[in-house]
Amino acid sequence: MEALNNIKTYLLQLDTFDDVETFSRLQEEVRNLIGQPGISIGITPFYFINNKFVFSAIHSVNSIFLKNLPDEEQKLKASEGLKNYFDDHQQPLVIPEITDETLLSYTFIEHLHHQGWKGIIFCPLRNYNKLMGVLEIVSDQPNLADEKIVNEIDVALPLFELAVNRARATLDAKIDKVIKEQFTAIQPSVDWRFTEAAYNFLLRQEEDEDAKMESILFDNVYPLYGSIDIRNSSIERNKAIQLDMLEQLDMVSSIIKKAQDETDFPLLGEIKFKIKKFKHSVHNIILSDEETAINLFLKQEVVDLFQQLKNIAPSVEEDIGKYFTAATSFVDMVYHHRKEFDESVTLINKAIAKFIDKEQEAAQKMYPHYFERFVTDGVDFNIYIGQSISPTIPFKDFYLRNLKVWQLTTLAKAAQLSNQLLNDIKVPLQTTQLLLAHNYPISISFRPAERKFDVEGAYNIRYELIKKRIDKVNIRDTNERLTQPGKIAIVYSQPKEGEEYLEYIEYLVAQGLLTDEIEQLELEELQGVVGLKAYRVGINVNVDKKTVSKLKSEAYKG
């Protein structure tokens, strides 16, 4: 009885199976329980993600069954064999002595035989008849692992099942935490509503097994939208592609010219002529079909040619080696200027996203609200605030106005930060800043398939329509883009919306964050949207070293 109590104590200490010290003590107590010092025990938990076996050294550190199997393929084969056996058998598998006959019957134990084990017992560990793992009892002497041990250990098996299930629950909780933090739109400000809906669903399911999850809707919330966009990112990306193509074509041309000095193959002249045409195309506006043709030429025709040239013209072998080194990347092309562009975009996006996340922590303390951001070539964010999101805290207009000042301030500081990042990036990319003023509440509902909130209702959809179309809008009767580096554009449709933000602008001008360069503009008509206006205000990007240090510290933190 003492051994059983000790086993229970040690198993309750195991949230995972990577605690070697506790497991060693547990093993000694199992030996005491069954009265057999010459045995060893192990536990193999079976973990499935998306109905597939997953293997982790952390979770199987005390598994005899998986120990010393060198790769996942062998672990998968052995595990599937053991699982398939227990899908058809409820009782433990007892093999007192591993013989040629048992190896034919149970091919999944062959590796244990090679490791020197002479006898083995597998005890299935289940949860509501679902196999969650196995307890292994092994011996390096034949006929020690027998039915007698199964009878002795039977009383402790429920404890091992409890431990395996607790370990699985711990893993599930960790996975769920990561999903919530990294992927889903479920944030602390709205998590209460999802918990409530889940509880109601469980209650309804007791009466109706076909019960469905209720819709999650927030009425009368005020939307705020902000965007920090990388200026001319498509143009800069295309420029980088062109420069890489020209660099690669020049390399090919140089090798062909050198090879012509050694051999008079007429095909080399034809290839050189083709390169000249391609370079002319790249120097001008390159069309998609031309880009495809050049890519095929470089990835197929040039590769085949160079493989032959290494034998025909030995003098270019070293140059060809250097060419393939330069062109070997995840795109199988020269990836020089594009790498610099991609790294520059990534640095800007990461820095601004982290900065906004940091600022958002302070904003949540003003009044709980729903916040989401998206990273593409720049960073966009949506905010929804209202009584329905935080029903326990009385909502006042004061909180909404406070968040609007935060929105304008954050965009200005993000512009200051991106201006300072010009010293840290290889491609001098600038950002533009934009926000949409909207003083009327809307409704949003959660879309389970997309795992995000969307607006509800025809009038509310107009807000989304405007939001999607203003990023590239021009000033009326001009070809000038509204958004410009070093400025914030504030789009509105109602005079009161513009007047409100004008008050905030004047305050931030007095604070030195914005300049007194304020323009009031009318915007071109967009499809389905007319009558939009905007304020455009300059940002004081020439900040002192202390401010620069603080901005970068917050952006690069973590």
Image: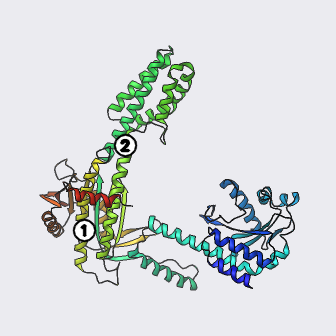
Q: Is residue 265 left or right of residue 420?
A: right
Marking on residue 406: 1
> Residue 438, image x and y in percent?
24, 68
Spatial CA distance of label 1 from label 2 is 33 Å
Q: Amino acid at mark 1?
A: Trp
Circle 1 crowding by C-alpha within 10 Å: few under 14, some 14–19, many from 20: some
State the image quarter where residue 159 is shown. Answer: bottom right
Name the foreground residue: 496 vs 237: 237
Q: Amino acid at mark 2?
A: Glu
* Position of the C terminus by quadrant: bottom left
> Residue 524, image x and y in percent?
20, 54
> Residue 316, image x and y in percent?
50, 22
Residue 131 can be seen, yes or no: no
Circle 2 crowding by C-alpha within 10 Å: few under 14, some 14–19, many from 20: some
Please tell me whether mark 1 sits on a helix, a strand or a loop: helix
Q: Earlier in the sequence, mark 1 or mark 2?
A: 2
Q: Residue at image x 65%, y 77%?
A: 11
> Residue 277, image x and y in percent?
38, 26
Residue 330 can be seen, yes or no: yes
* Position of the N terminus by quadrant: bottom right
Marking on residue 137: none
Q: Which residue lies under the disc numbered 2?
A: 340
> Does residue 470 lie above or below 147 as drawn?
above
